[in-house]
Amino acid sequence: MIIAWIGKILEAASSRRAMEVGVLKGSPSRPRSHSTYLMGGGVLLLILGIVLMNILILLPGALLVGMGLLLAFIEAVTEEYDNKK
């Protein structure tokens, strides 16, 4: 159930941005979102925490990934709302 919920969040967050923002298709006029950097930093901390087997590194990594997902979801919802106006 949690995995399906996370999948829906990721789908909602990336549905609008997938075509416009990407590694190859990104435009310099539209910079990456803060959620991208939060999730990237969180993933790096998660990898480092797994390699070092240190829970004190894993927990902040998981927190950053969660915050990034939440921010991406909020951005996607508000952007969709702004487009409907």
Image (cartoon, rainbow, N blue to C red):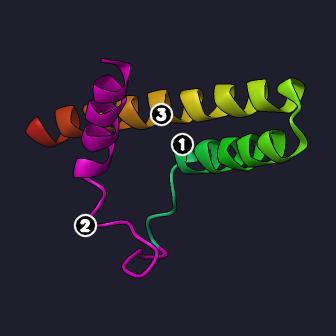
Q: CA distance from mark 2 to mark 1?
A: 17 Å
- Can you give x and y, in whole percent of width and height, for residue 46 in the image? 72, 40
75 with respect to 41 (left or right):
left
At 88% from the left edge and 25% from the top edge, which residue is drawn? 56
**Which residue in the structure is indicated by mark 3?**
69
Residue 35, numbered label: 1
**Which residue in the structure is indicated by mark 2?**
19
Magenta highlight range: 1-28
The amino acid pointed to by label 2 is: Met
The label nearer to you, 3 versus 1, is: 3
Residue found at the far bottom of this picture = 24
Query: Residue 23 magenta-drawn?
Result: yes
Viewer-closest of 53 and 74: 53
Q: Is residue 51 above or below residue 84?
A: below
Discs 2, 3 touching: Cβ within 8 Å = no
Query: Residue 84 magenta-drawn?
Result: no
